Image: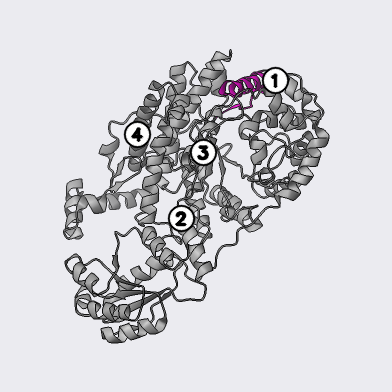
Amino acid sequence: MTDHKNMEAGERLLSEFPTPSLEAWKEEVIRLLKGAPFEKKMLTATYEGITLQSIYTAEDTKNLPFQDTLPGEWPYLRGTEALGKRLNGWLIAQELPFADPKDFNEALRHDLERGQNAVTILLDTGGYWGLDADQTETEMVGKDGTSISAFADAVQALDGIEPTIPIMVVGGAGSVPAAALVVAALKARGADLAKANLTLGNDPLGFLAINGQLPMSVDEAFDGLASLTNWAIGNAPKTKTLVACGFPYFESGANSVQQIAFTLSGAVAALRAMEARGISVENAASRMVFRLKIGGQFFMEIAKLRAMRVLWAQAARVCGASDEAAKICLQTKNGRLNKTQFDPYVNILRGTTEAFAAIVGGADSLHIGAYDEVLGGQPSNLGRRIARNTQVVLREESKLDHVADLAGGSWAVETLTHQLITAAWKLFQEVEAMGGLQKALETGFVQKAIGEVASARRKAVAARTDVIVGTNQYPNALEAEPEIRNTDHAAIKAKQGAKATAARKGQVKSKDFTALLDAAPKSTLGELSQALGRSGSIRVEPLSVFRITETFETLRKAMIRARKGKTDVFLANLGPVSAYMPRLDFTRGFFQVGGFSVEDKSWFKTPEDAAKAAIDSGAPIIVAVGLDDTYVEQVPALASAVKASGVRTVLVAGLLKDHADAFKASGVDDFIHVKSDVHAVLSGLAKSLEVF
């Protein structure tokens, strides 16, 4: 009764206030902007070519398709399960890139007791190419994963692990041979493969895109996957054997539209390849997994997963799959594109928002990288723990698995999802019209399209219109050069190579997966790879993987090493402190992101005082900081005096176009301002200091 009365009182109170219209809101915003353009301040252009509105209403979603569907209903906009993650949750599938199988197993058993609930076996670079430890270059052994060359390695990696736990093998060109070793190890443990929850296989065209070549022909790659799939149909019905991987596109700088479209194209190519080898679309589609990476654009990442789910459901149905087979399996991990070596603890925050986005978007499994993974080698114990517990907290404390379709009904997310669906489907059709993803890679279409977006990302970071906290904005000036961890690849190769040499028996007689499985206990990964065929190799221009912070990190490291203990920049602060403080903050940060040491503790009433202090500092770069009116009165005298003393560079913080010629005539070399290409300016100054 009390609640009913409170509701009535609340309704009466609200009725006394008029409901504002969108037009009224916009008028008020324009008034508060005080002449600044509404479109510039309140709308946000994205790399997808989509303009984010500052406010969304029910009108934006009024005519969008599938808004009346529920979780578990085709095309799965709101998830593939009616109860969402309420029953099973998402899989916490942390990757453990320990080079040695024994170390991997110890870390895995430790983490499984502390919240992780799935196994991810990530092959090292040698295994990724289908090579044994004694067949590959030293630096590839134990790099970015675990060295598994022999049956004993797989047995050791899974020692003590319950065979019923979900296991994912990520192995590139070595995935089918690795699958044989892992399955053989499970059989030796007496595992019931009919109940095993395994993800095997790979994405040949994704491998081609990122590496520029395959160690076999595309046909041979799909032959191996078809053999693996046929085996699974008869022996391991819950096993996934086909992969559509969007990782290469994400890490090369692609926008979300491109990631969705190219990944979908890879999935459709796999369906066609399996159908050509006698495997029905129904069987192939039901064994497909999609691997996508999650970035820092929170709402875009949520919408990306939802759009991927809808587009796959539609494409699979058109290809002839049942609605059940068209349910997507989304295996996700956060990407490295925005991760930093400087101020690495900020990566914890990035990982948290990315984990949240993945879960809200409906990920079925998730890996969150350790905050220090970009420092090379194995992640620290603390880094592993925080990354794992990020997911555990979201599950156990935030209860994100208790709500189906966490973003459902959000006008912004629903609108953005529809925009991604529309744009990605258009790009997908364009790729299909070329003959599919392989043709699009061979002609360079994919590389060119992604390259244009990647270039725009680099420019935005260089100019600081895209902010990377702690790297190109808000740096810690006292931070030392990060310590890069190294792996003893030679020691690992000696150990793992000896085991591979001893295990190589020449027992593989057939490329059929059943034969590979029978031979696995007495064979190596390299032998199994060779049996699958390596008759030819296709080559295309590879995508270029990068981190958007690398250019600033390289500059900053070089400055720290070359100029340690020296003052690089003297800020000649002119006029009263309260007036120039905002410009001082800007200028200080401008140089510190490049590792330049800055002296800025004094302010000066006259240009003569400022010039004397600047000269006495010994700094090779002098920057005038103050208000424009002060500049007109004092900068010419300041610049003339310091240039006469032999100082190399004089800059002015701000852009005074009307006085630029006069200032330069007095000795000013350039102006720094909010539209400057920060990285280009700092790199030029570093070269003048002979740092490069």
Q: How many marks?
A: 4
Q: Earlier in the sequence, mark 4 or mark 2?
A: 4
Q: For the residue carrying disc 2, how many other residues have a C-alpha within 10 Å: few (<14), some (14-19), or many (20+)?
A: some
* Secondary-structure class at tag 1: loop
Nearer the camera: disc 2 or disc 3: 2
Q: Earlier in the sequence, mark 2 or mark 3?
A: 3
Nearer the camera: disc 3 or disc 4: 3
* Secondary-structure class at tag 4: helix
Is residue 136 depicted above or below 4 in this figure? above
Q: Check disc 2 and report the residue beneath it.
A: 551
Amino acid type at circle 1 is Lys
Q: Name the residue at 41% across, 47% down.
A: 297
Disc 2/disc 1 C-alpha distance (Å): 46 Å
Q: Check disc 4 and report the residue beneath it.
A: 418
Stretch of the chain drawn in magenta: 217-243
In which image quadrant can residue 635 be found?
bottom left
Amino acid type at circle 4 is His
Disc 2/disc 3 C-alpha distance (Å): 22 Å
Amino acid type at circle 3 is Phe
Disc 3/disc 4 C-alpha distance (Å): 22 Å
Q: Earlier in the sequence, mark 4 or mark 1?
A: 4
Residue 411 image point, x, y percent: 33, 41
Amino acid type at circle 2 is Thr
Q: Check disc 3 and report the residue beneath it.
A: 247
Q: Check disc 1 and report the residue beneath it.
A: 511
